[in-house]
Image (cartoon, helix red, strand yellow):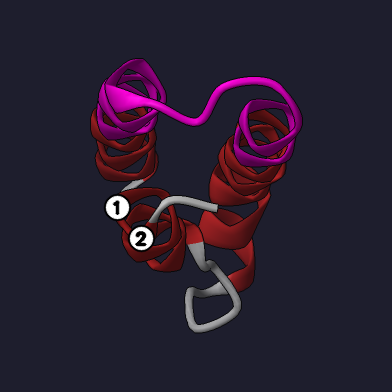
Amino acid sequence: MHYSTVALLKFFEYEHLPTKLQDVSKPFCELAHKIATDADRHADNIETTVCLRKLLEAKDCAVRAAL
């Protein structure tokens, strides 16, 4: 797995959040790991990094919206 993929995955962790926000964040974490795993089997490249970055932006928006 590319180092930039690994570096981004840590930002999808959600266990530290309150339960309400965990419920919002968890599906993004699961999807991020699926994308990273699929990319690792096929072609982990810059597009994987961009995809995860944009997913992270969406997750952050969803968590803020739930506050």
Residue shown at 29% from the left, 52% from the top: 4
* 36 over 21 or under it: above or below: above
Residue shown at 60% from the left, 48% from the top: 29
Looking at the image, the residue that sits furthest to the bottom is 16
- Most frequent secondary structure within the magenta stretch: helix
Which portion, as a residue range, is magenta? 36-55
* 20 over 32 or under it: above or below: below
| Residue 3 in the image, given as x and y percentages of width and height | 35, 60
What is the C-alpha distance between the residues marked 1 and 2?
4 Å
Residue 32: image quadrant is top right
Could you tell me the amino acid type at mark 1? Ser
* Residue 14 lies in the magenta-colored region: no
Residue 14: image quadrant is bottom right
Left or right, 43 with reference to 9: right
**Of 67 and 53, which appears nearest the observer?**
53
Tag of residue 14: none
Q: Residues within 10 Å of mark 2 (few under 14, many from 20)?
A: few
User: To which residue does mark 1 refer?
Assistant: 4
| Residue 8 in the image, given as x and y percentages of width and height | 34, 54
Q: Secondary structure at mark 2?
A: helix
Left or right, 29 with reference to 5: right
User: To which residue does mark 2 refer?
Assistant: 3
**Of 66 and 4, which appears nearest the observer?**
4
Q: Secondary structure at mark 1?
A: helix
| Residue 26 in the image, given as x and y percentages of width and height | 66, 50
* 3 over 15 or under it: above or below: above
Could you tell me the amino acid type at mark 2? Tyr
Left or right, 61 with reference to 28: left
* Residue 46 lies in the magenta-colored region: yes
Q: Are marks 1 and 2 in contact (CB under 8 Å)?
A: yes
